[in-house]
Image: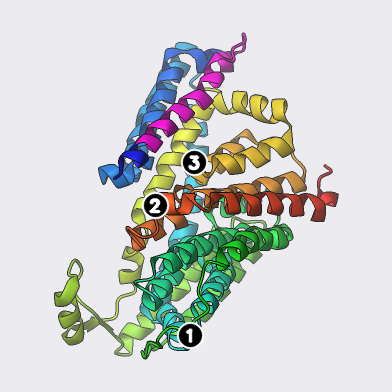
Amino acid sequence: MSAKLKSGYRQLLILLTIMILPLVTHADDSTVTNLAASWPGITSLIIFLVAYTLVISEEILRLRKSIPVIIAAGIIWLLVAIAHARIGNTEHLDEVFSHDLLEYAQLFLFLLAAMTYINTMEERGIFNLIRVKLTSRGYSLRTIYWITGLLAFMISPVADNLTTALLMTAVILKVAPNDHKFIVVSCISIVIAANAGGAFSPFGDITTLMVWQSGALEFSEFFNLFLPSVVNWLIPAALMSFTIKTTAYETIQETARVEYGAWVVTGLFVLTLVMAVLSHNLLHLPPVLGMMTGLGLLKMYGYYLRQHGEKYTGAPTGVSGDLALRLAATQTRPYDMYQNLEKAEWDTLMFFYGVIMCVGGLSSFGYLAIGSDLIYGGLGHTTANILIGVFSAVFDNIPIMFAVLEMNPQMSPGQWLLVTLTAGVGGSMLSIGSAAGVAVMGQARGIYTFFSHLKWSWAIALGYAASVATHLWLNADKFTL
């Protein structure tokens, strides 16, 4: 890691401290503020700050991001119990903790079902088929640039922005492995497009899913963000496209094998998403009910594949490289749907637990109530929601959005749409601002970097401002309570 990047992390730590200190010093005589100013409250805030600094330093320390926040969550809730015991107010602690845990459980099960479907579709060859179709057509580099960006925008509302960004980046790296300029601008375009596409769908990003499950917006209301999301991607994508050559590259001759049952799995995934929407809109039950029912259908289909002789071909778990390729050609074993369940992003799922419980603990000290007064009361809803998008470029948008939902400010549908848009696309301004950006940095390691992305942050900021302006103009009628 370069000295410049290490310096950037130090500056970020200073920024975090500057942002948090006003919450501590904003004191009055209320019980909530007394808790915030108490030593358990201040200690909890410092612990969260340290834990999150470790999270954003993951690339330097090689420490899984879930570890510090899970430990921090346990310590913070211990301090919550101590602080409330000191004032004799422990009756509702179990209820408050259970509320936050339930929020996480619904998110966890929803994502687990979705990740299992995505992994199964990948194992059945659906995504590889898309990659091969693109690389075997002989398109020019500029055409590939636009196609991958467009597909990232179109696929991410269903398949989530992280998976989509990784899929499209694989295409870019296959097409022109030695053209670093092309790879950089294409990766930036893909990250922006995946984040923008995920912003107008409840299934496209963790933050949109959280907003939908909270009941702040109805399913159909998210699609009001379609045009602002398009603007968010198109402006920087158009500006960057002028740096790409129009010459065609050498066609890559490949064949893609789609495994038996691939299209059935895809159909079951669509059915599962429909059931999730119907569970929420018609039955007034959490969307996770539809997702878990769909997961059951997928596992039943996996049982059918196993019983009818379908084999899972591949190398044993933990084997990679040339040895994996040789073993994959010779080893078969009975098809097991749990293989795809095991491939879920468990570190990410555990990270969500830590973040949600940390933020919930800080809320018990009154920090979110104070923050809501400072941000929404002092700046106004529109300014505050625009700044939240800027903050999400530095912090992860998940704790920011969860904090907003915990604050639960009284806002119109237009304002909830605005914060959903800004939290979803604001992270594109820095490569570390979104899960898609961080994942693509790892996939195109040494080529697409923090600083190569930073060179185009001005263009991404233009797209961000234009998308906000488009929403304020297009959905002006939704800004009344």
Left or right placement of residue 447 versus residue 207 in this view: left
Real-space Cα distance between discs 2 and 1? 28 Å
Residue 273: give its label.
Answer: none
Q: Amino acid at mark 1?
A: Trp
Q: Is residue 424 above or below residue 78?
A: below
Real-space Cα distance between discs 1 and 3? 39 Å
Q: Amino acid at mark 3?
A: Val
Give the residues drawn in magenta, as a range.
Answer: 7-33
x then y, percent, for residue 294: 50, 70
Left or right placement of residue 35 versus residue 226 in this view: left
Q: Is residue 432 above or below residue 8?
A: below
Residue under the point 40% across and 40% down:
354
- Helix, strand or loop at disc 1? helix
Q: Mark 1 — residue?
A: 263
Residue under the point 40% across and 80% down:
128
**Is residue 15 among what the camera can see?**
yes
Quadrant of the drawing holding the C terminus = top right
x then y, percent, for residue 38: 47, 13
Real-space Cα distance between discs 2 and 3? 18 Å
Q: Amino acid at mark 2?
A: Thr
Report crowding for label 1: few under 14, some 14 to 19, many 20 or more residues within 10 A (C-alpha).
some
x then y, percent, for residue 96: 52, 32
Left or right placement of residue 1 versus residue 228 in this view: left
Q: Earlier in the sequence, mark 2 or mark 1?
A: 1
Residue under the point 70% across and 53% down:
466
Q: Is residue 229 magenta?
A: no
Residue 348: give its label.
Answer: 2
Q: Toward which corner of the image does residue 193 lie, by quadrant?
A: bottom right
Q: Toward which corner of the image does residue 371 lie, by quadrant?
A: top right
Return the residue nearer the eye: 338 or 127.
Answer: 127
Q: Mark 3 — residue?
A: 394
- Helix, strand or loop at disc 2? helix
